[in-house]
Amino acid sequence: MPLQRFTQVYGIQDAKISPLLTDPAAGTPTYGPAIDVPGIKTYEISGEIEVKTLRGDNKKLATNSALTNVQVAITHAKMSLDVLAAIIGGSVTDTGTTPAQKTSWDLTGSNANFPPFKLEGVTPPNGVDIIGGDVHVVMHKLTCSAFPDLGFAEEDYRIASFTADADPLISTDKWISVVINETAAAIA
């Protein structure tokens, strides 16, 4: 019997970003190593549709809709220098030795290149109707659409967030993939 094509979706357990390295017209896209989005809290997808209506003979004759944008909004509990470098550019540098180690992310005018990336999120096991299963949502090609929310908050935790716009892959034309797994699987 085939797996059911509907499910509840409860929670998010993990999310990872992978830099898009190549997207050849006749081939398979390649991605860099997956980078954890630490403390993932929300993974929200929205879209924009342009609707055109044809009227004539004093009535509506036809309607046509076209997808014009897909956007994702992410919030995560911990700031990650590697995530910042993956979504807007810059470089991460580790220096020093214990007890004076440092790690820093530096963004300059020449390395703020907003590279494309893949984002994959997953529910916890049993966060779906299928006992032991999960759901993965993959955005295949994203580009950051606003500067990430960073900084500090007085007497409170500062939640990091970013938004990105999706484009279809040149190689496969995929924008989004939603996969229901009978057996929970880690993000590759």
Image (tube, rainbow, N blue to C red):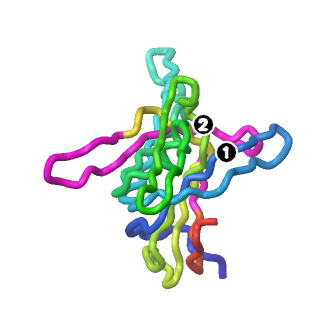
Q: Could you tell me which residue is drawn at 54 percent across and 46 percent down?
A: 93
Q: Residue at x 23, y 54 (%)?
A: 157
Residue that appears at 52% across and 29% down: 63
Q: Which residues are magenta?
A: 149-178
Q: Nearer the viewer, residue 166 or 186?
A: 186
Give yes or no for residue 164 being in the magenta stretch: yes
Q: Residue furthest right?
A: 26
Near-viewer residue (30 or 184): 30
Q: Position of residue 69 (x, y in %)?
A: 51, 34
Question: Label 2's element?
Answer: loop
Within 10 Å of disc 2 (Cα), the crowding (few <14, some 14-19, many 20+) is some
Main secondary structure of the magenta stretch: loop
Question: In this orientation, does residue 65 appear?
Answer: no
Q: Which residue is mark 1?
A: 20
For residue 185, say whether it is visible.
yes
Q: Are marks 2 and 1 in contact (CB under 8 Å)?
A: yes
Mark sitting on residue 115: 2
Residue 20 left/right relative to 8: right
Q: Quadrant of the N terminus?
A: bottom right
**Residue type at tag 1:** Leu
Q: Is residue 30 left or right of residue 17?
A: right
